[in-house]
Protein backbone atom coordinates (compact mmCIF):
# COMPACT_ATOMS: atom_id res chain seq x y z
CA UNK A 1 0.00 0.00 0.00
CA UNK A 2 2.03 2.93 -1.24
CA UNK A 3 1.11 6.60 -1.26
CA UNK A 4 3.10 9.02 -3.38
CA UNK A 5 2.99 12.74 -2.49
CA UNK A 6 4.42 15.64 -4.42
CA UNK A 7 4.69 18.95 -2.65
CA UNK A 8 5.20 21.95 -4.92
CA UNK A 9 7.70 20.14 -7.16
CA UNK A 10 9.58 22.09 -9.85
CA UNK A 11 12.13 20.87 -12.33
CA UNK A 12 14.46 23.13 -14.26
CA UNK A 13 17.33 22.36 -16.61
CA UNK A 14 19.87 25.14 -16.90
CA UNK A 15 17.35 27.86 -16.15
CA UNK A 16 14.65 26.36 -18.38
CA UNK A 17 11.55 25.50 -16.36
CA UNK A 18 10.20 22.11 -17.49
CA UNK A 19 7.74 21.33 -14.71
CA UNK A 20 6.26 23.67 -12.14
CA UNK A 21 3.98 23.68 -9.10
CA UNK A 22 3.27 19.97 -9.04
CA UNK A 23 1.31 19.16 -5.90
CA UNK A 24 -0.35 15.81 -5.89
CA UNK A 25 -1.35 12.82 -3.76
CA UNK A 26 -1.42 9.44 -5.46
CA UNK A 27 -3.45 6.97 -3.42
CA UNK A 28 -2.28 3.37 -2.85
CA UNK A 29 -3.08 0.98 -5.70
CA UNK A 30 -3.86 3.77 -8.12
CA UNK A 31 -3.17 3.36 -11.82
CA UNK A 32 -2.29 6.88 -12.91
CA UNK A 33 -2.03 7.64 -16.62
CA UNK A 34 -0.09 10.76 -17.64
CA UNK A 35 -0.87 12.42 -20.94
CA UNK A 36 0.24 15.68 -22.51
CA UNK A 37 1.99 17.21 -25.51
CA UNK A 38 5.42 16.04 -26.55
CA UNK A 39 8.22 17.66 -24.56
CA UNK A 40 6.02 18.80 -21.65
CA UNK A 41 8.01 16.83 -19.08
CA UNK A 42 6.19 13.50 -18.66
CA UNK A 43 9.37 11.41 -18.79
CA UNK A 44 11.10 13.90 -16.52
CA UNK A 45 8.28 13.37 -14.02
CA UNK A 46 8.77 9.59 -14.12
CA UNK A 47 12.54 9.98 -13.80
CA UNK A 48 12.04 12.04 -10.65
CA UNK A 49 9.83 9.29 -9.21
CA UNK A 50 12.62 6.84 -10.03
CA UNK A 51 15.30 9.11 -8.42
CA UNK A 52 17.12 9.38 -11.73
CA UNK A 53 16.47 13.11 -11.51
CA UNK A 54 15.97 15.33 -8.47
CA UNK A 55 13.43 18.13 -8.21
CA UNK A 56 14.92 21.61 -8.41
CA UNK A 57 12.42 22.61 -5.73
CA UNK A 58 9.79 20.83 -3.66
CA UNK A 59 9.59 17.35 -2.17
CA UNK A 60 8.52 13.88 -3.22
CA UNK A 61 7.43 11.56 -0.41
CA UNK A 62 6.67 7.84 -0.47
CA UNK A 63 4.47 6.80 2.42
CA UNK A 64 5.42 10.04 4.16
CA UNK A 65 9.19 9.54 3.85
CA UNK A 66 11.44 11.42 1.41
CA UNK A 67 12.20 9.50 -1.77
CA UNK A 68 15.46 7.52 -1.62
CA UNK A 69 18.19 9.47 -3.47
CA UNK A 70 18.93 6.55 -5.81
CA UNK A 71 16.74 4.07 -7.69
CA UNK A 72 15.64 1.22 -5.41
CA UNK A 73 14.13 -2.19 -6.11
CA UNK A 74 10.75 -1.14 -4.78
CA UNK A 75 10.36 1.04 -7.90
CA UNK A 76 10.24 -0.91 -11.16
CA UNK A 77 10.34 0.60 -14.62
CA UNK A 78 9.45 -0.41 -18.19
CA UNK A 79 10.25 1.74 -21.23
CA UNK A 80 8.84 1.60 -24.75
CA UNK A 81 12.02 -0.16 -25.92
CA UNK A 82 15.36 -1.35 -24.61
CA UNK A 83 14.15 -2.43 -21.18
CA UNK A 84 15.60 -5.93 -21.67
CA UNK A 85 19.16 -7.04 -22.42
CA UNK A 86 19.65 -8.51 -25.91
CA UNK A 87 22.56 -10.80 -24.94
CA UNK A 88 20.61 -12.57 -22.17
CA UNK A 89 17.91 -15.21 -22.56
CA UNK A 90 14.36 -14.59 -21.41
CA UNK A 91 14.98 -16.38 -18.09
CA UNK A 92 18.33 -14.65 -17.57
CA UNK A 93 16.69 -11.28 -18.19
CA UNK A 94 14.11 -11.94 -15.50
CA UNK A 95 16.74 -13.26 -13.09
CA UNK A 96 18.84 -10.18 -13.60
CA UNK A 97 16.26 -8.01 -11.84
CA UNK A 98 16.50 -10.35 -8.87
CA UNK A 99 20.28 -10.48 -8.96
CA UNK A 100 20.58 -6.71 -8.89
CA UNK A 101 18.24 -6.63 -5.93
CA UNK A 102 20.10 -9.40 -4.08
CA UNK A 103 23.61 -8.07 -4.34
CA UNK A 104 24.60 -4.68 -5.69
CA UNK A 105 28.24 -5.70 -6.00
CA UNK A 106 28.40 -9.35 -6.97
CA UNK A 107 25.12 -9.39 -8.83
CA UNK A 108 25.08 -13.20 -9.04
CA UNK A 109 22.90 -15.75 -7.29
CA UNK A 110 24.23 -19.16 -6.32
CA UNK A 111 22.92 -22.47 -4.97
CA UNK A 112 19.66 -22.39 -3.10
CA UNK A 113 19.07 -18.67 -3.69
CA UNK A 114 19.48 -19.18 -7.45
CA UNK A 115 17.13 -22.17 -7.50
CA UNK A 116 14.51 -20.17 -5.62
CA UNK A 117 14.95 -17.21 -7.94
CA UNK A 118 14.61 -19.53 -10.96
CA UNK A 119 11.33 -20.86 -9.57
CA UNK A 120 10.08 -17.31 -9.14
CA UNK A 121 11.22 -16.38 -12.65
CA UNK A 122 9.43 -19.45 -14.11
CA UNK A 123 6.23 -18.56 -12.26
CA UNK A 124 6.40 -14.99 -13.49
CA UNK A 125 7.08 -16.08 -17.07
CA UNK A 126 4.02 -18.31 -16.88
CA UNK A 127 2.06 -15.37 -15.52
CA UNK A 128 2.98 -13.20 -18.53
CA UNK A 129 2.53 -16.05 -21.04
CA UNK A 130 6.19 -16.65 -21.90
CA UNK A 131 6.81 -20.15 -20.54
CA UNK A 132 7.65 -21.57 -23.95
CA UNK A 133 10.12 -18.79 -24.69
CA UNK A 134 12.31 -19.16 -21.57
CA UNK A 135 15.52 -20.03 -23.42
CA UNK A 136 15.06 -17.59 -26.31
CA UNK A 137 16.82 -14.25 -26.76
CA UNK A 138 14.84 -10.98 -26.99
CA UNK A 139 15.57 -10.66 -30.74
CA UNK A 140 13.70 -13.94 -31.26
CA UNK A 141 10.55 -12.51 -29.64
CA UNK A 142 7.80 -10.31 -31.09
CA UNK A 143 7.39 -6.76 -29.79
CA UNK A 144 4.50 -7.82 -27.57
CA UNK A 145 6.51 -10.70 -26.11
CA UNK A 146 9.45 -8.39 -25.42
CA UNK A 147 7.19 -6.06 -23.46
CA UNK A 148 5.76 -9.03 -21.53
CA UNK A 149 9.35 -9.94 -20.71
CA UNK A 150 10.10 -6.36 -19.64
CA UNK A 151 7.10 -6.52 -17.31
CA UNK A 152 8.29 -9.83 -15.83
CA UNK A 153 11.77 -8.39 -15.34
CA UNK A 154 10.37 -5.34 -13.56
CA UNK A 155 8.03 -7.41 -11.39
CA UNK A 156 10.47 -10.03 -10.07
CA UNK A 157 11.58 -7.71 -7.26
CA UNK A 158 7.92 -7.15 -6.31
CA UNK A 159 8.05 -3.36 -6.65
CA UNK A 160 5.54 -1.28 -4.76
CA UNK A 161 5.56 1.27 -7.56
CA UNK A 162 5.73 0.48 -11.26
CA UNK A 163 6.69 3.28 -13.63
CA UNK A 164 5.81 2.81 -17.29
CA UNK A 165 7.06 5.10 -20.05
CA UNK A 166 4.90 4.43 -23.11
CA UNK A 167 5.41 0.70 -22.64
CA UNK A 168 2.88 -0.33 -25.27
CA UNK A 169 3.35 2.58 -27.69
CA UNK A 170 5.09 0.54 -30.38
CA UNK A 171 2.66 -2.40 -30.39
CA UNK A 172 0.00 -3.24 -32.96
CA UNK A 173 -3.59 -2.65 -31.81
CA UNK A 174 -4.54 -6.34 -31.35
CA UNK A 175 -1.40 -7.13 -29.38
CA UNK A 176 -1.89 -3.95 -27.38
CA UNK A 177 -5.41 -5.00 -26.39
CA UNK A 178 -4.10 -8.34 -25.08
CA UNK A 179 -1.28 -6.77 -23.12
CA UNK A 180 -3.73 -4.26 -21.62
CA UNK A 181 -5.70 -7.16 -20.16
CA UNK A 182 -2.47 -8.63 -18.79
CA UNK A 183 -1.37 -5.28 -17.37
CA UNK A 184 -4.65 -4.77 -15.54
CA UNK A 185 -4.49 -8.29 -14.13
CA UNK A 186 -0.91 -7.82 -12.91
CA UNK A 187 -1.80 -4.48 -11.39
CA UNK A 188 -4.72 -6.00 -9.51
CA UNK A 189 -2.84 -9.07 -8.33
CA UNK A 190 0.26 -7.21 -7.13
CA UNK A 191 -1.62 -4.25 -5.62
CA UNK A 192 1.09 -1.96 -6.98
CA UNK A 193 0.74 1.73 -7.58
CA UNK A 194 1.31 2.27 -11.31
CA UNK A 195 2.26 5.55 -13.02
CA UNK A 196 2.19 5.29 -16.82
CA UNK A 197 3.08 7.84 -19.50
CA UNK A 198 1.17 7.40 -22.73
CA UNK A 199 0.37 9.32 -25.89
CA UNK A 200 -2.74 7.22 -26.40
CA UNK A 201 -5.78 8.76 -24.71
CA UNK A 202 -7.93 5.66 -25.11
CA UNK A 203 -5.18 3.62 -23.43
CA UNK A 204 -5.03 6.16 -20.61
CA UNK A 205 -8.74 5.76 -19.91
CA UNK A 206 -8.75 2.01 -20.47
CA UNK A 207 -5.98 1.34 -17.97
CA UNK A 208 -5.99 4.32 -15.64
CA UNK A 209 -7.99 4.84 -12.49
CA UNK A 210 -6.96 8.45 -12.81
CA UNK A 211 -5.79 10.47 -15.81
CA UNK A 212 -3.50 13.47 -15.32
CA UNK A 213 -3.05 15.99 -18.13
CA UNK A 214 0.26 17.88 -18.18
CA UNK A 215 0.32 21.15 -20.13
CA UNK A 216 1.93 24.54 -20.08
CA UNK A 217 -0.69 26.98 -18.85
CA UNK A 218 1.34 29.99 -19.83
CA UNK A 219 3.71 30.70 -22.67
CA UNK A 220 5.88 33.73 -23.14
CA UNK A 221 7.37 34.44 -26.57
CA UNK A 222 9.95 36.72 -24.95
CA UNK A 223 10.87 34.28 -22.18
CA UNK A 224 10.26 30.79 -23.57
CA UNK A 225 12.05 29.13 -20.64
CA UNK A 226 10.08 30.88 -17.94
CA UNK A 227 7.04 28.63 -17.64
CA UNK A 228 6.89 24.89 -17.29
CA UNK A 229 4.09 22.38 -17.60
CA UNK A 230 1.84 21.56 -14.71
CA UNK A 231 -1.25 19.43 -14.10
CA UNK A 232 -4.13 21.08 -15.91
CA UNK A 233 -6.69 18.27 -15.66
CA UNK A 234 -7.04 15.57 -13.02
CA UNK A 235 -9.72 13.07 -13.97
CA UNK A 236 -10.99 10.15 -11.91
CA UNK A 237 -11.90 7.43 -14.37
CA UNK A 238 -15.39 6.02 -14.11
CA UNK A 239 -16.37 3.26 -13.49
CA UNK A 240 -13.74 2.37 -10.87
CA UNK A 241 -11.61 -0.53 -12.06
CA UNK A 242 -10.83 -2.32 -8.81
CA UNK A 243 -14.19 -4.07 -8.58
CA UNK A 244 -14.77 -4.53 -12.27
CA UNK A 245 -11.43 -6.20 -12.93
CA UNK A 246 -11.68 -9.15 -10.58
CA UNK A 247 -9.41 -11.86 -11.95
CA UNK A 248 -11.38 -14.85 -13.18
CA UNK A 249 -10.10 -18.25 -12.10
CA UNK A 250 -8.50 -20.18 -14.95
CA UNK A 251 -7.26 -17.01 -16.62
CA UNK A 252 -5.94 -17.22 -20.12
CA UNK A 253 -2.81 -15.38 -21.19
CA UNK A 254 -2.21 -14.87 -24.92
CA UNK A 255 1.33 -15.56 -26.07
CA UNK A 256 2.13 -12.87 -28.63
N1 LIG B 1 18.81 15.92 -18.91
C1 LIG B 1 18.25 16.96 -19.50
N2 LIG B 1 18.94 18.12 -19.69
C2 LIG B 1 18.35 19.19 -20.27
N3 LIG B 1 17.07 19.21 -20.71
C3 LIG B 1 16.34 18.10 -20.55
C4 LIG B 1 16.88 16.91 -19.95
N4 LIG B 1 15.91 15.96 -19.90
C5 LIG B 1 14.82 16.52 -20.48
N5 LIG B 1 15.08 17.78 -20.87
C6 LIG B 1 14.13 18.70 -21.50
O1 LIG B 1 12.97 18.70 -20.73
C7 LIG B 1 11.81 18.83 -21.56
C8 LIG B 1 10.83 17.72 -21.23
O2 LIG B 1 11.34 16.47 -21.70
P1 LIG B 1 10.59 15.10 -21.44
O3 LIG B 1 11.34 14.05 -22.16
O4 LIG B 1 10.37 14.92 -19.99
O5 LIG B 1 9.19 15.38 -22.14
P2 LIG B 1 8.03 14.34 -22.52
O6 LIG B 1 6.76 15.01 -22.18
O7 LIG B 1 8.29 13.02 -21.91
O8 LIG B 1 8.22 14.26 -24.09
P3 LIG B 1 7.75 13.14 -25.13
O9 LIG B 1 6.26 13.03 -25.01
O10 LIG B 1 8.17 13.67 -26.47
O11 LIG B 1 8.48 11.86 -24.76
C9 LIG B 1 12.31 18.82 -23.00
O12 LIG B 1 12.40 20.15 -23.44
C10 LIG B 1 13.68 18.21 -22.88
O13 LIG B 1 14.54 18.71 -23.88
Image (cartoon, rainbow, N blue to C red):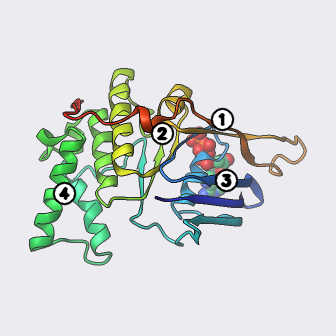
Q: Are marks 3 and 4 in contact (CB under 8 Å)?
A: no
Image quadrant assignment for residue 15: bottom right
Real-space Cα distance between discs 1 and 2?
A: 13 Å
Between discs 2 and 4, the one toward the N terminus: 4
| Residue extending farthest front | 243
Residue at (56% x, 52% y) in the render = 27
Between discs 3 and 1, the one toward the N terminus: 3
Label 4, secondary structure: give it.
Answer: helix
* Mark drawn on residue 166: 2
Between discs 1 and 2, the one toward the N terminus: 1
Position of 178 with respect to 27 (left or right) is left
Residue at (54% x, 66% y) in the render = 63
Select label 3 or label 1 by which is in front. Answer: 3
Q: Is residue 221 above or below residue 59?
A: above
Residue that carries the numbered disc 1 in the rendered image = 37
- Which is more toward the observer, 52 or 6? 6
Amino acid sequence: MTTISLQNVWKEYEGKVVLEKLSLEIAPQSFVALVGPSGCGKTTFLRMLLSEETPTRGRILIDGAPLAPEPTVDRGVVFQRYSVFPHLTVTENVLLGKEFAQSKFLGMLYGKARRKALEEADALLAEVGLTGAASKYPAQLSGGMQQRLALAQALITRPKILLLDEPFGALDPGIKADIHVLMLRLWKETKMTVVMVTHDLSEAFRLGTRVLVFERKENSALEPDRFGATITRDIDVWPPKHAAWATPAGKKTPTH
